[in-house]
Amino acid sequence: MLAELLSLAEIRDIIVSERMKVYEASFNFDLNNAPDYSYFFNIINFIPKRDNIKITLQDENERIFEVSSSKTEGEEEYKTFLKNTLDDETINVKLRIDKKVEENHFSIYSYDEFVKDILMLSIEQVMIAFSGLLSQVSTFLVFDVYSPMTMFATKTMFFVPYRSQITNSEFNRKQRMESCKEVSYFYNFDTYEVLPDDFKITINYESNPLTELFQKITMLLSISFIATSSSINGRQLKGIINGQRTMEYCCDINNIPDNKVLYRIYNWIYTDGSPIDKAIIARNVISLHCKYVSIIEIDDKVMASIQSNYNMYLKDNVKDYLELKNKVAEFISDIVSKTGEYATSLLDKFKSNLIAIFGFIFSVILANIVSDQPLNNLFTREITVLVECVLAGSFVYLFICYFQSRYEIEKVYESYEQLKLNYKDILTEDDLLETFGNDEGLNKMKKTISKSEKLYLGVWIVFLIAALLIVEYLSSNPTYQVIGKELDLFMQNIKKMF
């Protein structure tokens, strides 16, 4: 590791510090104990390429030499630098590493110094520092700890020994952040772009110096995202919870106790189900419970009450949901039933038309019976024309009935599709398929209607054609003969003209 590489030479007065994004070390060595150039070259090669390292040597005459990443060129320059230095002089070395996030990894070269610097910062500064790193990743961040061997983790940050294998985190940080923005207004979210889950320790080790700090931040952010609105101003966290009653709270961010119920409520709100519905229920219960106690003092009873209220809410919703599905099913049943009625309406109209035609013919026959006209000359020229006009009218009536029936059926189909469209935002895709039976009932009815229409339409047309032929056959003066005579007369007149 880096500390071991530094100790390979005879150096003294070593000072190491590590901040969030910068590692610095300084030490001295006597000219007669000057290390080989490979000493510096190995340090440079040890540092991952994502980080930028700079090593500067300075003698007592303030001559400066910067170690190069090229071993061939750098070694010659290094020898020249040492050669021009007096034998009794001391060389001061400064090493600086600027750390960067790349491919979800970030370096910690001296965990103890890193933690020491973190603990010197205020809570706001700590959140800003980690926010700057986490904003560069979408899911999780791995801290490669070079020294000493350290391992602990939160839901999104993994502090592990260098080169340890880390599997992908299942926690969807991006989605959780979107949900938090949608449900709660945290005024400082743009500044502290962090979640309670970022600091919720899931794997820990004994005497971890960051445990208490991370717990405070977890509680602080949990309260912020439970509230309707909140903000951090100086050392105070202020917020409003709009529930059965409107309550305001104010907490000292440095003295927030480790109340694990707060994180459990936050995590419950934003895990599964509708975060908005859950937040409303949680705020209703908390606003009533915190009438005489502080929000940081809520206990397991509050969590149990929130879950009980939510279960009752789900039962009411399930009841309404089932009623909704039953109403939809009844409506679909009515639509299919009406469609079947429209299919037989063409037959009913055909029967009515048939009765009217036979009624007319019967009345003609009856009139001839009571008259002096012989029955063997029943279909005279006048009666033939009259009956044929009735049959022609029946043809017209047939098409009117057909198009009326088609129009009524199409309106039913449109109502069915409109019903599906209206419930598209209420029911899920699976619910729609289940409720509407995947349109199997409607498709079956369409086939039945199509067959019925073709059958009734065919029977009606065949009847009218047959009736027309029979009338012509029984007529004493058929229409086709009259038309033939008229055509012959017309042709004779044409010939006379020419």
Image (spheres, rainbow, N blue to C red):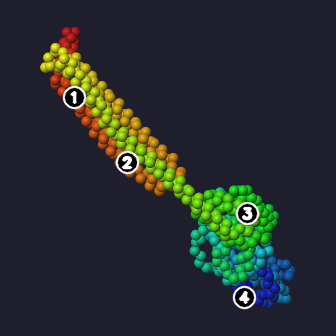
The residue that mark 3 highlights is: 290
Of the numbered discs 2 and 4, the one sitting upstream in the chain is 4
Residue 283, position as x, y percentages in the image: 68, 60
The residue that mark 2 highlights is: 443
> Which secondary structure, mark 3?
loop
Q: Is residue 22 shown left or right of residue 471? A: right
The residue that mark 1 highlights is: 467
Amino acid type, label 2: Asn
Q: Residue furthest front?
A: 370
Q: Residue furthest top?
A: 497
- Observer-side mark, 3 or 4, equals 3
Which is nearer the eye, 211 or 5? 211
The residue that mark 4 highlights is: 8
> Which secondary structure, mark 2?
helix
Amino acid type, label 1: Ala
Numbered-mark total = 4
Tell me the quarter of the image containing the N terminus. Answer: bottom right
Of the numbered discs 1 and 2, the one sitting upstream in the chain is 2
> Which secondary structure, mark 1?
helix
Tell me the quarter of the image containing the C terminus. Answer: top left
Is residue 472 in view from this perspective? yes
Q: Is residue 388 above or below residue 412?
A: above
Q: Spatial distance from mark 4 to mark 1, Cα to Cα?
A: 118 Å
- Observer-side mark, 2 or 4, equals 2
Which is nearer the eye, 380 or 163? 380
Q: Quadrant of residue 197?
A: bottom right
Residue 449, position as x, y percentages in the image: 34, 42
Q: Which residue is painted at 48% across and 44% down in the image? A: 418
Query: Mark 2 near mark 3, Cβ–Cβ under 8 Å?
Result: no
Q: Spatial distance from mark 3 to mark 4, Cα to Cα?
A: 61 Å
- Observer-side mark, 4 or 1, equals 1
